Amino acid sequence: MSVLPLSTENYQNVAIRDIKLGMFVIAVTKQKGDIHFKPGMVSSEATCRSLQSMGVLEVKIDLTRSKHQQETLLENPESNLAPEEQVQEIMTPTEKKESRKQAQKLYAEAKILQTKLLDALKNGEVVDIAPLEAMADEMVDSIFKNPDAMIFLSRIREKDTYLMEHSLNVGMLLANFGRYLKLSRQTIKDLLVGGLLHDTGKVMVPDEILHKPGRLTPDEFVIMKKHVEYSVQFLDKAEGISSIMRTVAANHHERLDGLGYPRGLKGLELCLISRISTIVDVFDALTADRCYKKGMQATQAFHILLQGAGTQFDETLVKQFIKCMGIYPIGSLVKLKTGKLALVIESNTETPLQPVVKIIYSTTGQHYLDVKIVDLARNTTEEIENVVHPKAYGIDISQFF
Ligand SMILES: [Fe+2]
């Protein structure tokens, strides 16, 4: 039995007498004799006894995957429900409109704060994350209240602000995925702040490499990869950085097969936080418009993630991420069988193939239509044919929020 060289802060060694139900054991660190061990959650007293009788003296647990750890942090009585059973707050149309307005205001403020943060770092100033923490609190509230509104905002891009928007979007997508996975509120907030800070080291990468249209040369790639190290250095100098925030920054380019960077960590060396960070970071990068390329549609990005599932990415988490985002993700443009184009603005958990859409354009007449909101679950005449790219019709989705 080998002892794995694990270094992340989200692991803890626990003596066998202190092991508790719900702990996720990833390795045996002390033992008597030869032991055949498979990682997993301690789900019964019988498992505890069997570990003892096998001669296990001490194990390493992954705190982020341990139910025991999550439960001590949980504030929400619904938290023991499976993701599918999550209860969404029911809002009237006026409340929904209000929550969309609030989300939009918050998102605008977040953009300003994030820009200031990156500017401060460029000028060599020490980061104060207190304002980010306060904003993250409000954003987590907003995500719990109306996740669709926040996710819609994260799908709208402006040109030339890639780093700021990518960081903000990774933060929001991570928080939303954390909500879906029923992680504790504190973990969700840390994920959000971790996302905001994960690429801060890019301010140290020369612009000609950072914004190079096209493939980087091997030498340029070496410089680009250094952004992870720089991000971690920034975080180590800042106060109030949790181990979750640091993990998002340090491990978002690692891959399960060990082919990521900077440390080439693999398999069990990557905790839950690292695994979800890589998935979200890749998803956002693939769907982003850059000055030199069109962003992919979310559904195309899902295919890429699925291709890497089981090798580069955690297969179960990729599938859960896709489920969390929805078959027709918020912000997607879809073509209806009647030839109209519509924007997906709200998901229907009961009927995921029939989301709520905003009809905006006629492909047969090639003109915009009076905007009409239709709940496809309640409308028998409209049905989705496929997802289309807004650029194919010259449509700017940002004006339809
Ligand atoms: Fe990065």
Image (cartoon, rainbow, N blue to C red):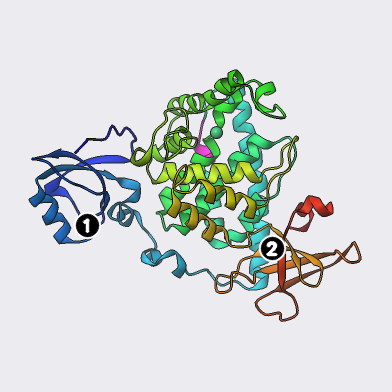
What span is in magenta?
128-132
297 sits to left or right of 5:
right
Residue at image mark 1: 21
Q: Quadrant of the N terminus?
A: top left
Mark 2 C-beta closer than 8 Å to ligand 1: no
Q: Nearer the viewer, residue 247 or 354?
A: 354
Which image quarter: residue 237? top left
Q: Nearer the viewer, residue 98 or 355?
A: 355
Q: CA distance from mark 1 to mark 2?
A: 42 Å
- Is 121 rendered above or below residue 188? above
The amino acid pointed to by label 1 is: Leu
- 187 falls in the magenta region: no
The residue carrying mark 2 is 344
Residue occupying image coordinates x 58% and y 47%: 304
Looking at the rendered structure, the secondary structure element under dot 2 is strand
Q: What residue appears at the point 47 percent right and 45 percent down from the top-left corner?
A: 313
Disc nearer the start of the sequence (1/2): 1
Percent from the top left, x then y, of residue 302?
Answer: 58, 52
Give residue 205's position: percent from left, percent from top.
60, 22
Residue at disc 1, secondary structure: loop
Where is residue 141 drawn, in percent x and y?
52, 56
Magenta segment main secondary structure:
helix
Do we see residue 109 in this rendering?
Answer: yes
